[in-house]
Amino acid sequence: MLQISQALMIGVTGGLVAALITIGFQKYWDRVILPWYGERLYKDADIGGAWNGIFMYHNNEKEEFICDIHRKGHKVTGEMINKQDGKFYDFHGEFRNMILTLNYESRIRQEVDRGCFTFLLLNNGQDLEGLATYYYNPDHTVQIGAMKLTRQDDTQEFENVSEEGDFRASNIQERE
């Protein structure tokens, strides 16, 4: 009887250890290996960074937003901040073949403010223009709106360029 219970315990323990190793490897695969591999294969434009946005609701009201986009391979995450009322929205989605698709929702979980965007990258990577479907609370309907995001200026990249477009000799010497 002791041998049977001992063999049973060894089998159960071995099964649990194998399951834990499999689950751990799967999480490592999903969180480390696949993102690393995706980053190596990624060939689309880099849309990461800060963007200014104007959203036009279905009733022609406008609101301004600031968006911070993070990209890892084709996966995109980030946040939007409404400049008028300070509300935060989190979003996630994908960027493939110049098209960005996002799902967003309010950071305040009691609110049902959520929707989705589809953007097209335009103007040599400086603009994202697209449409949104969103839940409109006053009359409990789903509506369509338009949004344009413009990449915030990165003036540091252009500090070393003169008005004529030539690099300044003093800045080139500083680099050396």
Image: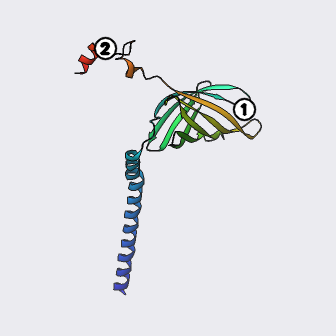
Q: Mark on residue 168?
A: 2
Q: What is the x, y in percent for residue 121? A: 53, 34
Q: Based on the displayed image, in which of its 4 quarters is residue 148 positioned? A: top right
Q: What is the x, y in percent for residue 130? A: 61, 35
**Quick one: SS at disc 1?**
loop
Q: Based on the displayed image, in which of its 4 quarters is residue 103 positioned? A: top right
Classify 10 Å Cα crowding around label 2: few (below 14), some (14-19), many (20 and above). few
Left or right: 46 as drawn, with respect to 99? left
Q: What is the x, y in percent for residue 82? A: 59, 28
Residue at position x 37%, y 77% in the image: 11
Amino acid bearing label 2: Arg
Q: What is the x, y in percent for residue 124? A: 49, 29
**Quick one: SS at disc 2?**
loop
Residue at position x 38%, y 16% in the image: 165
> Comparing marks 1 and 2, which lies closer to the viewer?
2
Classify 10 Å Cα crowding around label 1: few (below 14), some (14-19), many (20 and above). some
Compute the Cα span from label 1 to label 2: 49 Å
First in residue order: circle 1 vs circle 2: 1
The quarter of the image holding the N terminus is: bottom left
Residue at the farthest bottom position: 1
The quarter of the image holding the C terminus is: top left
Q: Mark on residue 4?
A: none
Residue at the farthest right position: 139
Residue at the disc numbered 1: 58
Amino acid bearing label 1: His
Observer-nearest of 2 and 40: 40
